[in-house]
Image (tube, rainbow, N blue to C red):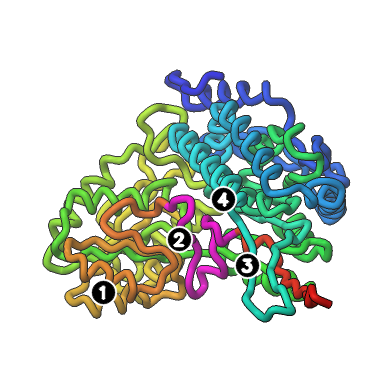
Amino acid sequence: MTIQYYTDSVRQNHADARADLEVLGAFETWIDGEWAPAANGETFETIDPVVQEPICSVPRCGAADVDRAVESAQSAFDATWGSLGAADRSRAILAWTETLREHIDELALVESLDGGKPLSHARAEIEFGIEFIEYYANVVRADEGITLPTSDDQHVYTRTEPYGVVGLIVPWNYAFIIAAWKLGPALAAGNAVVLKPAEQTPLSALYAAKLSKSIFPDGVVNVLTGYGEEAGAALSSHPTVGKLSFTGADTTGETIMETAASTVTPVTLELGGKSPYVVFPDVDIDETVRDVAHGIFYNAGQSCDACSRLLVHEDIAEEFLDALVDRAESLEVGDTLQEGTTLGPIISQAQFETVTGYLERGTDAGATLETGGVADESPVDDGWFVEPTVFTDATNDMQIAQEEIFGPVLTVITFSTYEEAVDLANDVPFGLAAGVATSDIDRAHRAAADIDAGSIWVNGSYATPRPGGPFGGFKRSGIGRELSKDALRHYTQEKTVYVSVDDPSR
């Protein structure tokens, strides 16, 4: 498959790419190992955000489709999947990852077009997601219960058992990666799944599900396309779903918690963030600038753990900001199918309007727009492109410092003391992630302990979680952890078995 497009016309590039996707066939919802239309026959278009043109139409699923998918998953669990041992499940999952790698070019192109990502970024994200699925296929083989020392006349041990059917709801910003983060442990633990991708970016999950055909029993993996208030709401309230896992906005997480409460369904929630990056005066400025720029501008800032607040010591603030602005202005906003593009568009017009609204509120509140804003020369007319944006002269009570923008917008605040830095870092409703830059190792460990966040990156590699490292948030950033071996526990129920043992001499 062609994976780069070099005509002078952005629209022609994307038309050629969409034509390449046609060889993959039509995308429908994936239920019981086959494509299926929505029960109501309705569809909606998924849009290429670079050129605002349709990629294809997919089913607009509702409650009837959720019922069918859950029934399919439950049947597959009861018939085969739920009774397989860990080794058999592991082998099947690893076979799936091999197939996914064989089709990585197609998956990357799907993810690039659907999510507005530079093609090289999309490919790296597909590879990254596959690594997490592999991780769970391997660690599940070492998963074990415990034996409890009690007395000579009783043997006590624990075992873990899958829920049966789990519902997975994932966002649009990292459609494949976050689906992989949930599919890996859910399947490895022995559950069948019903996955609802975001309506903006359903295609990579659908294609990955198609690639599982003949590897998993039909019904083990089901993917429903549709809107949150329709398919998502029906999935989160379904009485047969034994476990829910959601990644997305904190306000939506509240709704899912309320809905799940009616059926007493356990939930894992990975929600929003307003993550600080704290820069002390003893850093390598060039290295730290590169890390900060990656942390806020990658994926056009559409990351839940984006370091959208830079807290920089006043002694180096001027020098640091000069270097940061230079770095921001060197990034290439443009056609995601052209080599060298660093930032793609905002995912949709609605999100573009949200981001630009915050640009207005920032300046209205008195912050200084050092660089960025709406792109003066976007690749296409009226494109949803925002340049890497830096606000200075900000205070931590401004909306641009307190609320999640989900765009390439960095708010800079200075501090003078360690205590002030920590207070500023913690003075938001969220606690998903944080960065710390300092050459003082004692201060690094102290800051990592004092900042209220689920993940802390010290001196580089910001927002690069690794298999085995728990990921999740404090405060409004969520409940539970993903990415580590312990995530298997979120997809299983623990049972304690008490066996009475008679005296053999009787």
Instruction: Give, as a three-letter code, the residue at label 2.
Output: Ile
Q: Helix, strand, or loop for circle 1?
A: helix
The quadrant of the image that shows the C terminus is bottom right
Quarter where residue 425 is shown: bottom left
- The stretch in magenta equals 465-487
Of tags 1 and 3, the one toward the viewer is 3
The residues tagged by marks 4 and 2 sit, at their Cα atoms, a distance apart of: 36 Å
Q: Nearer the viewer, mark 4 or mark 2?
A: 4
Query: In the rendering, at what x and y percent does residue 372 appear?
Result: 32, 50
Q: Which residue is mark 3?
A: 146
Disc on res. 139: 4
Task: Measuring from the top left, give residue 79's x and y in whole percent.
Answer: 87, 47
Q: Identify the residue position indicated by label 1 in the image.
A: 421
The amino acid type, in three-letter code, at marker 1 is: Ala
Q: Is residue 205 magenta?
A: no
Task: Please name the residue shown 32% across and 69% down the image.
Answer: 448
